[in-house]
Amino acid sequence: QVQLVESGGGLVQAGGSLRLSCVASGSIFSINAMGWYRQAPGKQRELVAALTSGGSTNYADSVKGRFTISRDSAKNTVYLQMNSLKPEDTAVYYCNAEVVTGLVGGYWGQGTQVTVSS
């Protein structure tokens, strides 16, 4: 069993910053990739940023230059530094990880709310 727990969400004014964290725990042999998705009300869940174990990153065009994903492999933790936040960044942010236990599986966290006021 693998659990992902996010933290760091909250309410911030436009132009402000937040840092999200996600810790993976459980029967983990290794983690191939970790990433962040978000879902705004009435919209589909979308990829925000992803980071592979090899260090490759992928960002949504809407966050390039403002958000940075990083990872502490020793702690099975992924971070999302969000700067210059905009009201359109308001969403529930979900952590995702591709984890190797006895098999390879995808796991989701419970989500953390980020609200950006104008």
Image: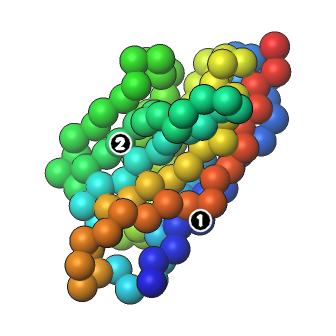
Element type where label 2 sits in the image: strand
Task: Tell me the SS state at disc 1.
Answer: strand
Using the rendered image of the protein, determine whether residue 94 is visible from the camera's viewpoint.
yes
Q: Is residue 17 visible?
A: no
Q: Which residue is mark 2?
A: 50
Q: Is residue 69 above or below residue 42?
A: below
The reply to whether discs 1 and 2 touch (Cβ–Cβ < 8 Å) is: no
For image coordinates 47% across by 17% down, the residue present is 62
For badge 1, the amino acid type reads Val
Image position of 86 with respect to 55: above or below: above
Q: Which residue is mark 1?
A: 5
Cα–Cα gap, marks 1 and 2: 17 Å
Q: Considering only order in the chain, which callout, 2 or 1, is on the residue closer to the N terminus?
A: 1
Task: Specify the label residue 100 is tagged with.
Answer: none
Quarter containing the C terminus: top right
Judged left or right of residue 53, residue 11 is right
**On screen, 26 above or below 47?**
below
Taking depth in this image into account, of 27 and 71 the one nearest to the observer is 27
Q: Amino acid at mark 2?
A: Ala
In the displayed structure, 48 sits above or below 87; it is below
How many numbered circles does the render carry? 2
| Residue at (31, 45) in percent of width and height | 51
Neighbours of disc 2 within 10 Å: few (<14), some (14-19), many (20+): many
Q: Residue at x 60, y 29 (%)?
A: 43
Q: Position of residue 97 (x, y in %)?
A: 38, 59
Tell me the residue at 24%/85% (across/down): 102
The spot of residue 34 in percent (x, y) is 37, 54
Left or right of 43: which side holds 118? right
Looking at the rendering, in which quadrant would you find the N terminus?
A: bottom left
Q: Which of the 4 quarters of the picture holds residue 109?
A: bottom right
Label 1 environment density (alpha carbons within 10 Å; few <14, some 14–19, many ≥20): some
Percent x, y of residue 96: 44, 55
